[in-house]
Image (cartoon, grey):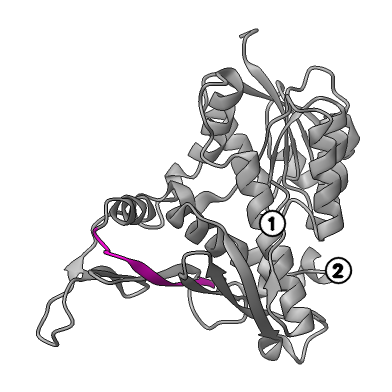
Amino acid sequence: MSNKLNVGVIGLGVGSRHVQAYDSHPNASVRIVCDFDNNQLKKMNSDQIITTVNAEDVINDKKVDIVSIASFDNYHKMQIIQAIQNNKHIMAEKPICQDWNELVQIYEAQKDHPHIKLSSNLVLRTNSMFQKFKKDIKYGLFGDVFYFEGDYYWGRKEKLFGWRSEMGFYSIILGAAIHMIDLIMWLLESKPVSVQAIGNNIPTKNTKLKFNSFAIIILKFQNGIIAKVTGNAGCVHPHFHGLKINGTKLTANHEFAGSYYMNSSSPKSNPEPILEPYPEKEVRKNIIHSFLDSIIDESKEPIVNMHDVFDVMSVCFAAEKAMNTGGEIDIEYLN
């Protein structure tokens, strides 16, 4: 249909899920895809989709309305800025760039093209359980929330030894902990004001990897709330997003063994099971669907808007600085 938004996808690893998400939306059509690997391109198996090994073919295609960027992290900044300059809306995998200066460059480029929309695939916001937590915080069921723990158990250490190990820089904060940082900021509808961080590479110390495979981050919010977040690539644990919320009336525990509420400190109290599904991967496409809807109808807000992306990236870069300096860093925001 002529009224469909034409999409180009760069990178067909996780980008193949982008293709599926666009294909399942009634007002989007994947026009062109790019990957270095011809075997990935052959999997498209469609005469209707153009394939290429050159990302610029996607970005420069005048019929493309949206560029979905799922390439290696070190290409993100360049491809995002090129897409902005070519008047394409952008859905980018996290992280959208690798350092603060790159983030400023993207921010300035978008300011020169204010009609361009930018989002990122911060998928935990779509989960029904986490949405329940957000509502229960908002309506006061927790009382006064004072502490969060968010643990990103990657549980896939082997992934560190692919393209990530070949880059000059890779961050477990930007690649893993970012999801839990974003989740907590979204749950609270608040931005932290300062951060401390420390990490190590013990799980990968006898390998060629030069970066930390574990990091722990402490976030402080203006109202006194504290959050502890980890990015844990070397864990002996299945992939999982652990979360604990402590309030004055209620505690939530989302653990691999089960998820439950506690509303009493009595040792005789029984946990109340939380029945909402997790990980609920089938609804993650809603990040992309809501982004499409916001382009079609500007009155609609995407699940992850551009300000959300710049904010969580700002926190992550402050955390990187804190880990490198050993100090507490005040967080600077672009918004």
289 on left or right of 245: right
Q: Position of residue 53 (x, y in %)?
A: 87, 40
Residue that appears at 66% across and 79% down: 197
Q: Which residue is drawn at the image coordinates 86% and 56% (left, top)?
A: 101
Query: 254 or 322: nearer the eye?
Result: 322
Q: Identify the residue position indicated by label 2 in the image.
A: 166
Quarter occupied by residue 326? bottom right
Q: CA distance from mark 2 to mark 1?
A: 23 Å
Residue 328 seen in this snapshot: yes
Q: Is residue 150 magenta?
A: yes
Amino acid type at circle 1 is: Met
In this view of the protein, can residue 35 be seen by the observer?
no
Mark 1 burial class by Cα count in 10 Å: few <14, some 14-19, many 20+: many
Q: Residue at x 56, y 57 (%)?
A: 191
Q: Quadrant of the N terminus?
A: top right
Q: Which residues are magenta?
A: 141-152
Q: Residue 138 or 171: which is nearer the viewer?
A: 138
Is residue 6 covered in magenta? no
Q: Residues within 10 Å of mark 2 (few under 14, many from 20)?
A: few
Q: Which mark is residue 313?
A: 1
Residue 178, picture quadrant: bottom right
288 over 242 or under it: above or below:
above
Residue 177: give x, y in percent of width and height. 60, 67
Identify the amino acid type marked 2. Answer: Glu
What residue do we see at 63% from left, 36% from top?
A: 19
In the image, taking residue 37 as reference, residue 220 lies left or right, namely left
Q: Nearer the viewer, residue 70 or 40?
A: 70
**Residue pushed farthest left?**
268
Is 39 drawn above or below residue 167 in the view shown?
Answer: above
Magenta segment, principal secondary structure? strand
Q: Are the residues tagged 2 and 1 within 8 Å (C-beta)? A: no
